[in-house]
Amino acid sequence: MRKSFTLPRAFHSLILLTGGLFLAATVMSAKPLAAPIVEAVDGVIVIEAESAPIDENWVLHGKDSDYDFVKGFSGDGCVQYKHGTEVSGPPTSPLTYRFKVNEGGDYMLTARGLEAPLETGEGDKANDCYLRLVGVPNYQGQFTKFVLLGESYKWSWNVKLESAHHYFESPLYPLKPGVYQIQIAGRSKNFFLDRLVLRRIAEDESVEDLGLKPKKFKEAKGDYQFKAIEDFSPVKEDGFGSVYIDKGRSAIAVNAAKEELRKIWSAADMKFTGKSGTYMLVLKTLTETDGESTYRVFINDNRVGNYSNPGSVIDYSPSYATFENVEINKGDTIRIECKPDTNGLIPEGDGTAWSRGRWVSVLLDKVR
């Protein structure tokens, strides 16, 4: 007759405890620490936005989402950026996706996104994030604005990389076989991302037909165009700081290394000798990665308006400030004032680097 063997009560407790710990450890380890490596299926690499671990600045939406407009997402869900404002911000809380290239060549990236300006209600808000492919050179390897060009509250594949101000392109990467990482970082609040798709481009496919050739914002010729370094002169009156000529960029700038010039306006002006009338005035500035410089435009002593450069991850890309219905008479003085700025993101010495208020030209297009 086989004798039964009974463990002491203490051993039962120990087994239950260690079993519980093992189960808890198993459940915890099941949580993904990184997105899976995605391989091509029929030559196409499909990455679902919800496949990467997210932090508190992102929200995962599935079938039980409170927002009806997210219906129609692919896969198991989509992600929403919830930090900052709907206007812009620095790259925050990057999501990392991994994929494997088996066959080298040129790969086009497309993305499906949605803008939901829940707070501002403005159609050009909540419409972008940042994108980079880790390890590739130049701007494609840096966090660059990835913007949806479409209607609000509708999923769209028309998400483009803004390689420079008003230059939009579908990213095209020359890739060798290997494992790569794509990162999406938050920029504007309430931007939704559903899916990323990479496909290899055949050699006989047209770049133009695929929409891969960058499209430039058309800069108007206008009736008059004045160059900063040729037509304007520094204002040397009391209360204004000094400016210098940045020949390499054909711009007027402020030496922000001098701390006293960071706190005041510096200016340049010119005497208008053209025909009196009402004009659209366009100030062309240059963005800088270390700060969003501010500008003021005056006709004589009447302020036309203010402008601040947008945040940018690309140095010296053109930006345009447009002022409508500006009355200008022959003999009036056009004055452009600028002030440096720092966004606190780029270390320099004991502090951070400052932008230099660079601007390039003033265009006048007569309205009447």
Image (spheres, helix red, strand yellow):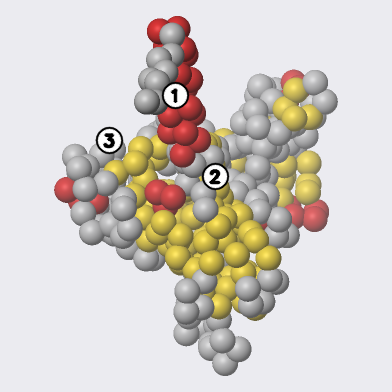
Q: Is residue 102 above or below residue 77?
A: below
3D distance between C-alphas at marks 2 and 1: 27 Å
Q: Residue at x 27, y 35 (%)?
A: 119
Position in image of residue 330 (x %, y %):
52, 53
**Quadrant of the rendered structure where residue 293 is?**
top right
Earlier residue among tags 2 and 1:
1
Q: Amino acid at mark 2?
A: Ala
Which residue position holds label 3?
Answer: 119
Q: Residue at x 46, y 39 (%)?
A: 30
Q: In this rendered view, identify the residue nearer to me: 356 or 291.
A: 291
Which residue position holds label 2?
Answer: 34
Q: Is residue 312 above or below residue 265?
A: below
Q: Which mark is residue 235?
A: none
* Front label number (2 vs 3): 2
Which residue ends up furthest to the bottom in the rendered image?
204
Q: Is residue 65 above or below residue 241?
A: below
* Front label number (2 vs 1): 1
